[in-house]
Amino acid sequence: MKFTTSLALLSALATSTAQILVPPGPVKGPNTLVFKQIGGIPNNECLTFTNSGEIVQAACAWTHADRQVTPGKILGTDVLIVQRGFAAPFRGDLVGKTACVAFNETTFRAEDCSRNDLLFVRFDVGNGRIQANGAPVCLSGYDSKAFVKIDIGLQRCSQFTVTAVAPTRP
């Protein structure tokens, strides 16, 4: 009996420890969105996720999963959950995982939502900005190849409008 009780206690401790160390998956909000940059590249002003998880601007297409994100939460923190799926040759670390938009100290891109070493990104409905949680970093436009740029300091943030769409299967 002592042995069984000890195993049950160890099992309970291991389960509660795992719950502390591994963040739960994101909880999706009710709307899947497509983001369109105000003043973006004409005819290519919607945000799109490439095979490698980078964010570029492309033509708006409401039914393409690579253009869709769903606002949600992880442990109360606002996140943007990427709708598209990823393939091993490009982003093997995201195959079968839920991807969120995150700041990796260089840019915003799709990353595994279960990582706890990144700053996740949110959409601020009040000012139309896409910005990092807990850091003064926002999307600020795009370069000559249509890759998005960031601004550290929140001085040159782009503004976005959103369109709610039916989620497309990745």
Image (tube, rainbow, N blue to C red):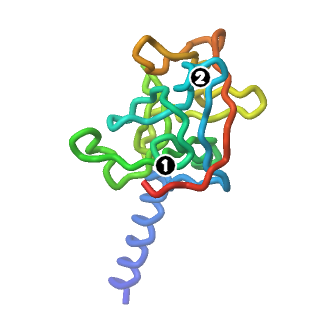
Q: Residue at x 34, y 55 (%)?
A: 96
**Foreground residue, 165 or 102?**
165
Residue lying farthest to the left in this orientation: 89
Percent coordinates x, y for residue 68 in the rendering: 53, 44
Percent coordinates x, y for residue 167 in the rendering: 55, 55
Quadrant position of residue 90: top left
Q: Mark 2 — residue?
A: 135
Q: CA distance from mark 2 to mark 1?
A: 24 Å
Q: Earlier in the sequence, mark 2 or mark 1?
A: 1
Percent coordinates x, y for residue 161 in the rendering: 69, 32
Q: Residue at x 38, y 70 (%)?
A: 10
Query: What amino acid type is highlighted by mark number 1?
Result: Gln
Q: Secondary structure at mark 2?
A: loop
Q: Which mark is residue 154?
A: none
Query: What amino acid type is highlighted by mark number 2?
Result: Ala
Q: Mark 1 — residue?
A: 83
**Foreground residue, 168 or 100?**
168
Mark 1 packing: few (<14 Cα in 10 Å), some, or many (20+)? many
Q: Residue at x 44, y 51 (%)?
A: 98
Is 92 positioned to the left or the right of 31 in the image? left
Q: Secondary structure at mark 1?
A: loop
